[in-house]
Amino acid sequence: MCAALLAIAACGSGPSSASIGPQGGIISSEDDGLTIVIWPGALGRFEDFEIVPSQMAPESFGQAYRVRPNVELAVGAEIILRGDLPNQLSKTRIGSLGADDVASGEIEWTHLPYLSQSIDEKASTVHSHDSRIALYYAILDDGVPGSDDSAGDESSSDDGSTDPTDPTGVPTTSYAADIAPLWEPTCTMANCHGTPASGGLTLTGDSYAALVDADAAINGAYTRVIPGDADGSLLVQKLEGTMPGDAGTPMPPAGGFPAASIALIRTWIGEGCPP
């Protein structure tokens, strides 16, 4: 059974590959069914990653994908699966299966952590995190409603999402460790968001309070960062160049803020903006 499971059967598209190193990066399958965001600092060297659809993984609700190499990460990767979602969203999870488990004969899916805003029904995506790159990933429909494998029901809301402010729902990001370093060195230069600060926003030193629940200086109708709402946060809109016309210019003005960094900021906001 193990030998059969390790065989690869493509389903509709070929492999997708990318070389990703210490600066981080993103790899997606050719059908966009699986996207893996590897954050800066997660890898100590360049690795050549490959994603391919597979029919040889255990039974799952959605298409399964095989990924290689299967490496430990210093910073957990974001795992995003896109496709038809189960009708019962409260039981929808991302399943992973590690290469070590396959080698030892443990051929069963493990649920990845279920976090606040894990499911985007409009985009047909499920998000989670993994501390290493597993051999297989797929959407499952057998999760326990309102909980994950590691947290009790008391840490979950009625809709099955984990409260990121609850101490039992351990966030995977923090502003001090993950977000503040993203501003160095380009965003903290003079006349940008150093001293003097463009738009009244200073990103040097302890800049958490300048962003979270803070009104934008250019237009008080907008909030720079809204915990739990990345799309509604002006910071994300400016980084992605989608801000309203009366909310100033993109960050940076020429655009091009790294996609992996924006994805990390989105994850941090989705987890409630841990300091």
Image (spheres, rainbow, N blue to C red):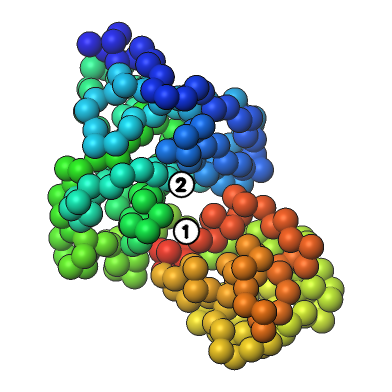
Residue 233 x/y as whole percent:
53, 73
Q: Amino acid at mark 2?
A: Glu
Give the residue displayed 57% in from the left and 41% down from the top. Answer: 26
Crowding at mark 1 (Cα within 10 Å: few <14, some 14-19, many 20+): many
> Pointer 2 and pointer 1: residues touching (CB < 8 Å)?
yes
Give the residue displayed 37% in from the left and 16% down from the top. Answer: 9
Question: Compared with residue 4, is residue 156 higher up or lower down, i.e. above or below?
Answer: below
Question: Compared with residue 33, is residue 212 higher up or lower down, i.e. above or below?
Answer: below
Give the residue displayed 39% in from the left and 23% down from the top. Answer: 11
Q: Is residue 131 visible?
A: no
Q: Which mark is residue 267?
A: 1
- Please identify the residue farthest to the top as the structure is shown: 3
Q: Which mark is residue 78?
A: 2
Residue 186 x/y as whole percent:
78, 62
Which sits in the foreground, 167 or 70?
A: 70
Which sits in the foreground, 229 or 227?
A: 229
Question: Compared with residue 222, is residue 227 higher up or lower down, i.e. above or below?
Answer: above
